[in-house]
Image: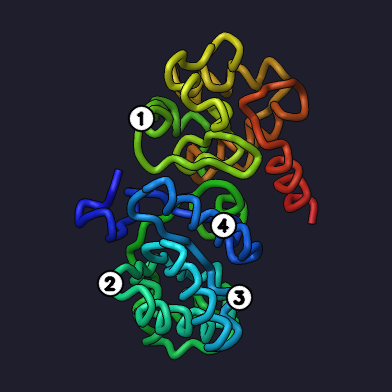
Amino acid sequence: MPSPWGRERVSLSHGLHFTGGEPFLNFNLLLSAAQMAEELGIPSTFVETNCSWCVNDEVTRERLEQLRRAGLKGIMISVNPFYVEYIPFERTERCIRISLEVFGSNVMIYQMEFYRQFKRLGLQGKVPFERYLALAATVGGNIAVEMFLMGRAARALKPYYHSYPASAFFGEPCQPPFLRDWHNHFDNYGNFMPGFCGGISLGSWRELDRLLREGIDLNEHPVLRHLITEDIRALLDFARDYGYQESPQGYISKCDLCLDLRLHLVKHGNFPELSPLAFYEQMALDANS
């Protein structure tokens, strides 16, 4: 579906966006994907980037102009305290400046609130998260932005949030994001991911027509069955059958609990909906590092 402002414009939950990981790590593949989307007549295409590749003006401009000539309509630039830990803020500013010259109004900064705060703070270079928190406190502390406490974020940010027992998240259904027809993701392993739920697959996007026509056999996908037809309590009870024990430290979000359950289940059973396995392998490595 194109942007409400037209096929040549971009907006967050419309059209097609290329994301990652960092899509510019394989620029030739990204360029080919943009060309293919243009040939297929897909509207409102844009790329999402963390700007790590924007090492100088020449490289930045050349790649953005190549993408525009290939048919890409715009760009979304990620700005938040978790990126600036690893990517000098100067690269982010360079990407924004040159993107505005190349794509005009089809530039989205996500999240603009952090960008404005970073400018007020005069950030330069890389900024460790603890230092960011100290600096932010000098200009009024945290700002109100949406935060998805899932995946690595739930683990890394646990010290900064209150934790709750699993029962605190009972009765919060996952069905709406699982069955929505907008802003879903297709990964490079072939998985059709519901919303932002990394490590969960509704099936193969290579068979998307069949999947949409025939649906999902929930008897063959018990993790999906519990999350779609019931709630997180049902998945917790299911995981207990495989020896799961609730964390005494608690959980900062329903997604934090869900991930912990899935990390346990993937080690004790064969569940095709828990895919790609590389996601869980990396999460386990992160936990042990």
Element on which disc 4 rests:
helix
Tags 4 and 3 touching, CB below 8 Å = no
Q: Earlier in the sequence, mark 3 or mark 2?
A: 3
Say which label, 4 or 1, has the lower sequence index. 4
Image point 59% across, 74% down: which residue? 52
Judged by depth in the image, the label closer to the viewer, 4 or 3, is 4
Task: Please tell me whether residue 28 is drawn above or below residue 148 in the rendered image.
Answer: below
* Label 4 – label 2 distance at C-alpha: 24 Å
Secondary structure of the residue carrying numbered label 3: loop
Seen at 53% across and 32% down, the residue is 166
Res. 53 mark:
3
Type of amino acid under label 1: Pro
- Could you give the CA–CA distance between mark 3 and mark 2, rounded to whole angstroms? 22 Å
Q: Is residue 200 left or right of residue 278?
A: left
According to the image, label 4 marks what residue? 32
Residue 148 lies, in percent from the top left, at 45, 50
Residue 275 image-quadrant placement: top right
Earlier sequence position, callout 2 versus callout 1: 2
What amino acid is at disc 4? Ser
Relative to 135, residue 183 above or below: above
Report, in whole angstroms, how far the alpha carbon at label 2 lies from the one at label 1. 32 Å
On the image, the x and y values in percent for residue 162 come to 49, 51
Give residue 176's mark: 1
Residue 68 visible in the snapshot: yes
Q: In the rendered image, which residue does mark 2 sit on?
A: 105
* Number of the front mark, 4 or 1: 4
